[in-house]
Image: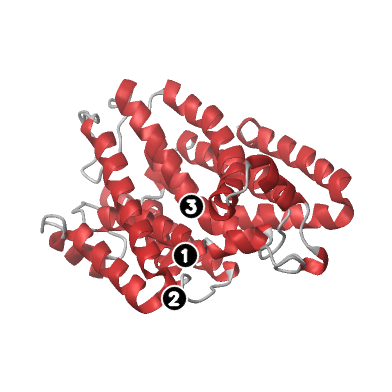
Amino acid sequence: MLLRIFGASFAVTVVSLVVAFLYGGPQALFLCVILGILEVSLSFDNAVINATVLQRMSDFWQKIFLTVGILIAVFGMRLVFPLVIVWAASGLGPVEALNLALNPPADGAAYFPDGSPSYETLITDAHPQIAAFGGMFLLMLFLHFILEERDIHWLRWIERPLGKAGKLDQLEVVIASVLLLITATVIAPDDKVSTVMIAGVLGMITYIAVNGLGEMFHIPGEGEESAGGPSGLAKATGKAGFFLFLYLEVLDASFSFDGVIGAFAITSDPIIIALGLGFIGAMFVRSITIFLVRKGTLSEYVYLEHGAHWAIGALALILLYSIGTHVPEVITGLVGIALIGAAFASSIYRNRKEKAQEALASS
């Protein structure tokens, strides 16, 4: 089963590394490996969340996400998205933007001799609006989860009162709006206040619209968990499946922002970024998602979903904070891994405790 799930990812990795070596030699090969590891470490929580949504979808829409979706993730977010930013920021056409990316100024300078900005500089300058949009989208996702009453709690001391507080209508919008206002007025540079506000509001609107459309067409089935988890009797098809697919693509894009921006701290070459983040990193994230769904891992380790959402909340706050202060990517990755690892360990402890109680009751 492992070979069937991860086989394609390993094959794509080998091909990508060969292409990287032929393209730029040992240095390109090394950078490609680093970027692949960066993407997987930053996106493990993405895989957990993807799995929670993916298992709600019919087999047809699962296949669409794992085929068409991977093309969007690889080419759309890791290759085309940075070029689109350059088009918008510089006014260059597609060919000129690609040429700018492939021909950086000498000695890694931020500007060309004529004073025009480099590809990397244009991408970096767009970070505030990218981080505001992605941060607010992910923050809304976290708040929607944590402010909902559910039967199972991981961090009971905080999740239970937050679930009760969530009965207040639109509380998540109020909290997100306050944090956006603080970000724009306190954290963002003075010349980026309006930009951050607009991008953040767009992130909130996008989440509300896409999530609302998905829930509009979702019909709970008998035995479905109150926490929103799916059952085998309720699989999203038709319009429901399409809107869940759309939701997953926007979610993946929001997770990708920090990885794409962070990649420019390693290299500004779009080909190496596409190979490392897209072909290697994104493929393994998809494989991890499939593994979690096929193995029923989320049902067996019940706190994993909680840990992933707390990691999302942390990532959202880091993205918003990074608008004013650079945050090393290693911190982002380690925070997510630590939270999910703690949730996994707590799940194992819970399972062992329940088995011990069952054995004691049967004896």
- Residue 349's label in the rendered image is none
263 lies above or below 6: below
Cα–Cα span, label 1 and label 3 = 15 Å
Other-residue count near label 3 (Cα within 10 Å), few / some / many at <14 / 14–19 / ≥20: many
Q: Going by the image, does 214 lie left or right of 10?
A: left
Other-residue count near label 1 (Cα within 10 Å), few / some / many at <14 / 14–19 / ≥20: many
- Residue 189's label in the rendered image is 2
209 lies above or below 42: above
Q: Earlier in the sequence, mark 2 or mark 3?
A: 2
The residue sitting at 17% across, 60% down in the picture is 171
**CB atoms at circles 2 and 1 under 8 Å apart?**
yes
Other-residue count near label 2 (Cα within 10 Å), few / some / many at <14 / 14–19 / ≥20: some
Which residue was labeled with disc 1?
128
* Tag 2: amino acid: Pro
Residue nearer the viewer, 352 or 342 = 342
Front position among marks 2 and 3: 2
12 lies above or below 124: above
16 lies above or below 264: above
Determine which quarter of the picture holds residue 266: bottom right
Please, what secondary structure does the residue beneath circle 2 have? Answer: loop
Residue sticking out furthest to the bottom: 186
Q: Position of residue 166 (x, y in %)?
A: 16, 58
The residue sitting at 84% across, 58% down in the picture is 27
Residue sticking out furthest to the front: 114
Residue nearer the viewer, 290 or 264 = 264
Which residue was labeled with disc 3?
255
Cα–Cα span, label 2 and label 1 = 9 Å
* Tag 1: amino acid: Pro
